[in-house]
Image (cartoon, rainbow, N blue to C red):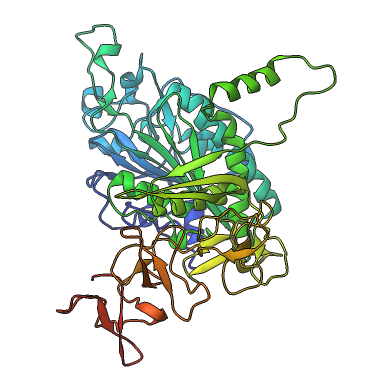
Amino acid sequence: MILSVLTCVLLGALSAQAEVVKSFSNCKEFFYEETEPTGMDKNAKKICQRYASTTTAFFASLYSERHRIPLYSAYIFHPECSDSSIKYSKFFIEPQLSGESEQRLSPESQFNVDQIKQNQAINGYYAYTDYDRGQLNPSSAQCGKGRDATFTLTNVAPMDDAFYRHHWYKVGKEMNRMLTTELQQNPAATPYLITGTIPQANYRIPRKEKSAQDEQREYEKVTVPSHVWTALCFKHPTDDKESFSLGYIGQNQPDSSIEVMSVRDLNNKLTELYDGMVKIFVDDCFPENEKSQEMVKSLYTVQLQSLQQLQMTPNLLKMFQTALTYNFAYEKPIVTKMTISLFFDSVYTFSEQTEKIKYVSDTACLLTSVKRNASSELLECKLVPEESKTEDGSGVNCTSACLYNKKTDDYRCYSKQNLVKCSPLYSAITVQGQKCKADHPCGIYGWSAYWCYKESGEWYYCSPPVWETKAQSGDYCRANYACSKYGEEFDYCYTTKTGERQKCCTRDDCLAAVDGKTCKSDHPCSYYGESYLWCYTTDGSWAYCCKNC
């Protein structure tokens, strides 16, 4: 992997050799020249954040003069000073943004404030509001003059005080602790971080309705971000197994919670919020690493206390309150069994969300019911501890979540630090909808097909965990009857639209044909004047296929 680990494609991103990143001595090289997503300010300014008499930049920010907030700050964590603290009553401004020759952060009192505020925020805009000057590059992650340099208005955005001081602070503090521990064990590694905002263009401070009427005060000057996010790439120079990444994002609201996830999932989330493709790190910085999964789960566990209460039925809530309220003579009550069901309106959301759940929490969601209506399927699953097995039939447990691997087009987990094929926990019903034994959910168990023992004691086939497969008619296969052989010589499924049995394709793409054949690249699946979908295949013949391209 090239050491230009901070490349943000389409996010005005950072790209440089690792040794340059460590010193930020040539900051201009950090900004990757690409078109930003629609949701970002295409005229944002690239700032190399310098302070006092130093010529070296301590970190880099992409600053929107239109919103008067940074779109992101990119920095490196320094553990030496994480326990000490420093505060400033007033934050610095950036003279360069206002046409001044000074290249370093300075107090706004040294300049004409009327000129300064044309292109950036001033301290007065934050006064008497419900918002803190939330640092993107936190002072707790820096040392010395580098820490001083974080106290600039080009590194802060309005963050709800409850969100910033409780939720965001708590996760950031745990992140610092984790990184400090990792650097003690791997001192040659470098933790690269980037923290960004999602501008909420129609909501700005100061809010006129929230302030005492003051004819001299200017209102609605600084955009309040709807979300704040952080991505980490911890890069070891020689041992990729010690490298890892993670991301988290929170809505800028007082009752918000922080979502912890893989960098790949954060990319997808930001792509949606920015309305444009986002890729934060090169190759997503080892998202499949066992270490990445461990660190995501560790951070996820810490922020669980900030989550809102579960919605419970009145009777269940009464039982919980009873157990927690009374003083028992011997010891506190223990919850020994609890059933939590989740519901999804499509196969896509089920597969996407349950993969995320496995990644962050060592919890799987077993499919327990699939109901069809005229337009969609309703899927129900039950949360259980993730205890997937390797696929070799040995009965050995995976040491990480069994997740779908795009590169190999199958499921993989770590076993003794080796990435191996695995049988994921995903369903507790057969293709006929019959319940599997509680201790024997659907799996490979050394076979080439997925199956389980039914409650009656007999075995039967389960649908394989291949989501959104298509039938020969072009209709999607049912969630619990995906494309597979099920003991036949050919692949078939039952469709969501008509419920009839048809030959099918095991992949939903333009080159997938029935019976596992592949369409020629210059002759993708289509009708070509016929009433059915077909293509010329790579074996020199033709075959039915499943997607009109």
Location of residue 244 (image quadrant): bottom right
Residue at the spot 21% in from the left edge and 11% down from the top edge: 216
Indicate left or right for 331 with 70 as reference.
right
- State the image coordinates of residue 440 (x, y, percent, origin top left): 66, 57
Location of residue 523 (image quadrant): bottom left
Count of labels shown? 0
Residue at the spot 33% in from the left edge and 39% down from the top edge: 198
Given the current orientation, which residue lies at the most extreme right position? Answer: 330
Q: Is residue 330 visible?
A: yes
Residue at the spot 30% in from the left edge and 64% down from the top edge: 475
Residue at the spot 34% in from the left edge and 31% down from the top edge: 93
Please, is residue 186 above or below residue 201 in the view?
below
Residue in the foreground of this view, choosing between 75 and 371: 371
- State the image coordinates of residue 486 (x, y, percent, origin top left): 51, 72
Please, is residue 74 above or below residue 444 in the view?
above
Indicate left or right for 514 with 259 as reference.
left
- State the image coordinates of residue 175 (x, y, percent, origin top left): 58, 41
Given the current orientation, which residue lies at the most extreme top position? Answer: 213
- State the image coordinates of residue 351 (x, y, percent, origin top left): 46, 54
